[in-house]
Image (cartoon, rainbow, N blue to C red):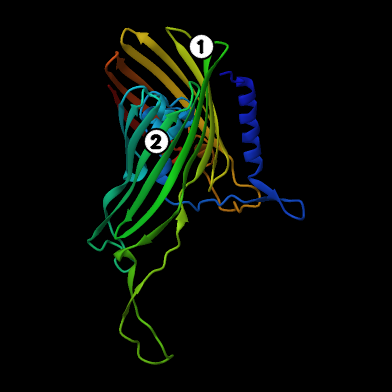
Amino acid sequence: MHYNVRGLLISAFVLAGATGGALTAQTASGTDQNNTQYGTSSAEFLLLGAGARGVSLGGTIAAVATSDASALYYNPGAASMMGRPGLLIGTYDYVGGTHYSWGGLNFPFGGGYNSIGIQIGSFGFSDQPVYTVDQPDGTGTTYSVTETFVGATFARNFSDRFSTGLTLKGIADQLGAAKGTAFAVDFGTHYHAKLKGHPINMAFVLSNLGSNLTYSGDGLAVNVIRDTTPGAPLEDPQPGQLDTKGFQVPTNFQIALSYDVVYSKTMALTALGGFNQPRSNGAGFSFGVEWNLPHLGNTKFGLRAGGSYTSAPANNISTTLPTQATGAESAQGWAGGGGLGYFNDKFRLAFDYAYRSLGILGGTNYFSVTLGW
């Protein structure tokens, strides 16, 4: 079957431009009106990634996530290209004493045309003291936060160049004595071919499309003292329940491209780029580069770097709050890392590391280990 690679690339960039153009609308007076709902998403931990390789490439890995189980997270459409069962476990020391972990397990079947996989991610902290206005030194009690998602993926190769995948997610958010639940889906496609003898990949991914996260539980229970008649004695406290507003999960649309600028038996240099549009933030662009030495005996060594940029709120969004962190904020999104692995026909073992800058919040470290058999 013949594919027009150049036509597909042009279509991808046209679609990216059309999507970016849809971010603003014109009012009757001709001024731009920004419709982005800044800061209105919940369960933002769903965006923390999976595996050090993806973190170090600045999120552009959706186009090349074909060799390990991180495809379950970044692009379910690429999960059917692994060729062998695989397991990936990663851990992320985030800011403020919080911690994030992710694990995924993927199994190809049907002669390698299909795959099924499961993944789990967890974020939170524990045993933090409770302070109140009446007890500023602490109440003597503690609380914990645990946010978790579990996903199941099915992926299929429809030809030697095109595959798709779908992930169903359940999301749980335990905030002290309050708990919230939601569900979401991810859908991804992956196109893979060669341009002038060098591999080229393209990915379209829609992630975290789902329901609102709503809360219930003992943490919302209150006792209310009602003054029914002005001047009358206060009545005894009456039990009540706080009513909370549900917030959508962080839906995101992404287009990613990769091309092996240098491609030989001894070395590969891959350039990556991507466009993404979150539901509750400005449009963003990301880029990355990966240098691999794939044939050092049974050893593989790689270095990676990437970055991302998110557009600022439009002028009609209030930005009057003072800030002194403009320079540090501009460093957010830069990342780098590397990996070392051992491969043979029956076994694969790899260790990867990534460092990511979070601007004024400092830097974070991500470690992951990959197994294949």
The x, y position of residue 92, in whole percent, is 33, 36
Amino acid marked by disc 1: Val
Query: 59 and 365: which one is in front?
Result: 59
Residue 87: name its quadrant.
top left
Compared across the picture, whether 98 is left or right of 285 comes to left
- Residue 319: percent from the left, percent from the top? 59, 51
Q: Position of residue 206 (x, y in %)?
A: 50, 40
Mark 2: amino acid: Phe
**Res 75 visible:** no
Q: Which residue is mark 1?
A: 262
Label 1 residue SS? strand
**Label 2: which residue?**
154
Q: Which quadrant is the C terminus positioned in?
A: top left
Q: Dot 1: within a 10 Å radius of its alpha carbon, few (fewer than 14), some, or many (20 or more) residues?
A: few
Q: Nearer the viewer, residue 206 or 219?
A: 206
Which residue is at 40% across, 59% downward?
214
Question: Does residue 71 appear in this view?
Answer: yes
Towards the viewer: 241 or 63? 63
Question: Residue 120 — which label?
Answer: none
Quarter of image, res 299:
top left
Closest to the observer: 120 or 127?
A: 120
Q: CA distance from mark 2 to mark 1?
A: 33 Å
Which is more N-terminal, label 1 or label 2?
2
